[in-house]
Amino acid sequence: MDLYLARAALRMTQIQLAVQIGTSQSRVSLIERGFLTPDNEEKKRIAKTLGFSVDAIDWPGKEAT
C-alpha cells in the first residue's frame, strides 16, 4: 500500500504521524513524496504507527526487487 494512502485511510494528518514517530511534518511530507528515504528504524516506526508491516508499505523511491 502506498504510504500516503495508508496514512489517509486512517484519517491521520502528516502532523499527527510526525508527532507519533518523533519527527517533523516536513520530513513526513518529503518521505511521502519520495524526496527522502527513511532508514529502517524510521520505516519500522511509521509502519507500526499505521498498523502495517514494513513490507506492506510501498515506500516512495523503493527499488523494485
Image (tube, grey):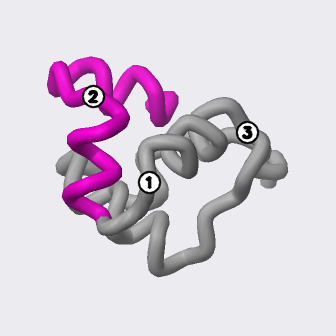
Q: Amino acid at mark 3?
A: Gly
Residues shaded magenta: 1-21
Residue for point 47% across, 64% down: 43
* CA distance for labels 3 and 1: 16 Å
For label 1, the residue is 24
First of labels 3, 1 by sequence position: 1
Residue nearest the observer in this picture, 35 or 44: 35
**Residue picked out by circle 3:** 34
Dot 2, crowdedness within 10 Å: few (<14), some or many (≥20)?
some
Left or right relative to 43: residue 37:
right
**Percent from the top left, x then y, of residue 36?**
73, 52
Outermost residue, bottom side: 41
The quarter of the picture where the N terminus appears is: top left
Residue 58 locus on image (x, y percent)? 57, 40
Dominant SS in magenta: helix
Q: Nearer the viewer, mark 3 or mark 1?
A: 1
Mark 2 element type: loop
Sequence-wise, which precedes: disc 3 or disc 2?
Answer: 2
- SS at circle 1: loop
First in sequence: mark 1 vs mark 2 = 2
- How far separated are the C-alphas under marks 1 and 2? 12 Å
Q: Is residue 5 magenta?
A: yes
Q: Residue at (36%, 34%) from the top-left corner?
A: 14
Between residue 11 and residue 18, name the one nearer to us. Answer: 18
Tell me the residue that label 2 is attached to: 13
Q: Position of residue 55 (x, y in %)?
A: 47, 56
At 21% from the left and 29% from the top, the residue drawn is: 12
SS assignment at label 3: loop
**Amino acid under disc 2:** Thr
| Contact (Cβ within 8 Å) of mark 3 with mark 2 | no
Residue 13: x, y in percent? 27, 28
Q: CA distance from mark 3 to mark 2?
A: 17 Å
